[in-house]
Image: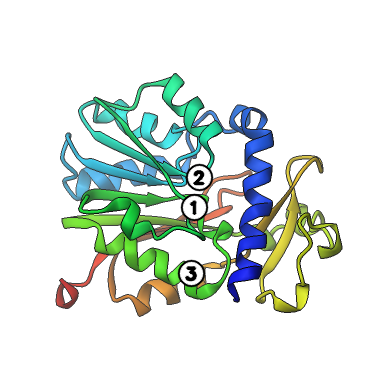
Amino acid sequence: MDDTTARQLADINAAFYASRAADFSATREGPWPGWRRLHELLDREGLPSAARVLDVGCGNGRLGRFLAEARPSLRYTGLDRCRELVAIARAAGGLGAEPEFLEADLVGDDPATTLGARRFDLIACFGLLHHVPGRARRQALLATLLAHLAPGGMLAVTCWRLVSFARFRDKIAPWHEAQPPVDSTRLEAGDHLLPFGDGDGLRYVHFADEDETAELLDELRVERVASWRADGQSDELNQYFLVRPARDRR
């Protein structure tokens, strides 16, 4: 995907989240059911109580609060472009000792520069991959995150199986409604424009199904710790992957 189109798609989402941060956060207060399985796996894999955690696309910080319930001494770093959502996360608290927040545009900025020399025991990329335009950018983001794991660290990723469900498919909007305008001939297969809730506000989403996401991870040579489906009424709304760098890659 060319840079101009990627920027247009990122700007659609930036405008949505900046204008609807409070409403969006109000619908995203509780933990996802799939996080219970994540918690079990992190215990099994021996994630330390003072784990360094990076929450990419942290929004209102609810993942951090969930993790901190069991690990109150964790060192939490939230990364998001939307300063309005980050402000909500800061105010809510419950994120361990001295949480850190980084502001970055994952399309226009280099996440490796933003993260610098930081290394993490756990990096979570939940509810985000479908907002990253272009396969090459999604792969580059995952590669950067893997490179910022500490020895023994793990990366947790979800893909939203939105097109697998009629209630989302039936809401997909035509591209001529996009603001700013987007040349739909420059999009990749699986790119969609989706209203939020009952139709107020449009977001760019990419249907990165589990096969596509697994392929991206496999190309980066990872060892799969676990994968599972959870969330939503069907308990299959999200596909989870918990991975670590393959041993021959370290």
Sequence-wise, the earlier of marks 2 and 3 is 2
Query: Is the residue under label 1 in contact with that under label 2 (CB below 8 Å)?
Result: yes
| Residue at which label 3 appears | 137
Would residue 65 appear left or right of 116 to someone viewing this image?
A: right
Q: CA distance from mark 2 to mark 3?
A: 16 Å
Residue 174: percent from left, percent from top: 84, 62
SS of the residue under disc 1: loop
Asked if 23 appears above or below 224 in the picture, the reply is above
Asked if 214 appears above or below 34 in the picture, the reply is below
Residue type of the residue flagged with mark 3: Arg
Q: CA distance from mark 2 to mark 1?
A: 5 Å
SS of the residue under disc 3: helix
Sequence-wise, the earlier of marks 3 and 1 is 1
Residue type of the residue flagged with mark 2: Arg
Quarter of the C terminus within the rendering: bottom left
Q: Quadrant of residue 165?
A: bottom right
Residue 96: percent from left, percent from top: 27, 26
Indicate which disc residue 105 carries.
1
Question: Which residue appears at 69% of the width and 53% of the height?
Answer: 12
Q: CA distance from mark 3 to mark 1?
A: 12 Å
Residue 69: percent from left, percent from top: 31, 26
Quarter of the N terminus within the rendering: bottom right
| Residue at which label 2 appears | 81
